[in-house]
Image: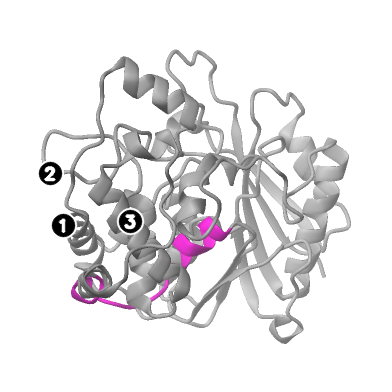
Amino acid sequence: MTLSSLNAVCPYFTMFPLEFPMRVLAKEQGNSKWVYDPFCGRGTTNFAARLKGLPSVGIDSSPIAIAIAKAKVVTTTFQAVARCAEMILKESPYPIAIPNHPFWKLAYSENTLLDICRIREELTRNCKSPARKVLRAIMLGALHGPRCKGLPSYFSNQCPRTFSPKPAYALKFWGRCNLKAPVVDVLGIIRRRAERYLSTQLPNVNSTILQQDSREWVDTGLNGLFSWVITSPPYYGMRTYIPDQWLRNWFIGGPSTVDYESRPTDFQHSSPERFSQQLRQVWLNAAAMSAANARLVCRFGGIHYRKQDCIEILKFSFRDSGWRLTTIRDAGSALNGRRQATQFGEGQKKHPRQEYDVYARRDD
């Protein structure tokens, strides 16, 4: 087990590697400099700051991202998480709502789904303690994934681990392969995962994770606080974060079906110019809360069906933003690590688009 084990509590397909913020913060140590991520996702930047002993703030509009990120900045033990799960399964009443679509009957065995629903309803009611926050993230990470030959690590039938399978496709796949929902020990999976992620004691650092829209969120009480802004915004054209995580969205209280309706907090992708304007507002807000000598590092790229030049989009967003661009570096592609541009599906022939690390300084 390593200090970074907890970072793997719940992977999903838009994550960037821990090495990215760790490399940026390599020379920093202690609690004198604050780190800010306005698109914190699953909390990778905040977790890196914690490992370096640096206080941080993370903002994201996705409730799934926030649930995962919060687990990475709290302090608890694997024994406390296991006890929490055990008490919920022992004392919680029969669930009020159990999905009954054919997908659910093949995705999970009857008793497995019952246990998942009991934990879901209790954590939806109360998820305030550190142990419950980590338990929620463990449940999100174990909710779906591949079947293995040894002890099971996931609750579901054969599934991807980074994004939720669409019901119609999953039913066809399971039927074609004659795959039945496995009978698993939910508590056993929770215990093994909790021990894997929490066996090593992590620094206790001042960290805040908030579900907010970073285009609008500014805390005047934080003006001049941040020395580092390290982030990776949504790539232009990437709009299906919640639908692609619909099972995890269900677990934290969302619907038991895929919902493709856009939300007010979603970035608008109607044109590169409109997208850049929204990013500029995020940079302006970040600048207002950053120190005079603050630095910003941003990883950005593109997706295949949007052919616009991602660097031009990003350059436009930094005009009159409170930040001065200093360096643009090649960051490789999704083949160099799990990045936002990763493409999925059997037989995928397209090569992931180039990604870049962009460096800027507070423009005073």
Give the extent of the magenta segment: 63-81
Report x, y in % for residue 216: 78, 66
Label 2 with label 1: CB-CB less than 8 Å: yes
Residue lying furthest left in this view? 150
Q: Amino acid at mark 1?
A: Gly
> Is 80 one of the magenta-colored residues?
yes
Report x, y in % for residue 210: 59, 71
According to the image, label 3 marks what residue? 116
According to the image, label 2 marks what residue? 151
Residue at 79% x, 45% y is: 268
Q: Amino acid at mark 2?
A: Leu
User: Which quadrant is home to the C terminus?
Assistant: bottom right
Report x, y in % for residue 76: 29, 77
- Which dot, 3 or 1, sits closer to the camera? 3
Q: Amino acid at mark 3?
A: Ile
- Mark 1 Cα shell of 10 Å, populated few (<14), some (14-19), many (≥20): some
- Mark 3 Cα shell of 10 Å, populated few (<14), some (14-19), many (≥20): many
According to the image, label 1 marks what residue? 188
Residue 348 position (above or below residue 49): above
Relative to 62, is 79 on the left or the right?
left
Label 3 with label 1: CB-CB less than 8 Å: no
Q: CA distance from mark 2 to mark 1?
A: 9 Å
Q: Residue 192 lies in what quarter of the image? A: bottom left
Residue at 18% x, 74% y is: 79
- Mark 2 Cα shell of 10 Å, populated few (<14), some (14-19), many (≥20): few
> Is 92 one of the magenta-colored residues?
no
Relative to 231, is 144 on the left or the right?
left
Report x, y in % for residue 198: 24, 67
Residue at 41% x, 76% y is: 53
- The residue closer to the viewer here, 77 or 298, is 77
Question: Which numbered disc, 3 or 2, marks the residue that appears first in the sequence?
Answer: 3
Question: Which numbered disc, 2 or 1, marks the residue that appears first in the sequence?
Answer: 2
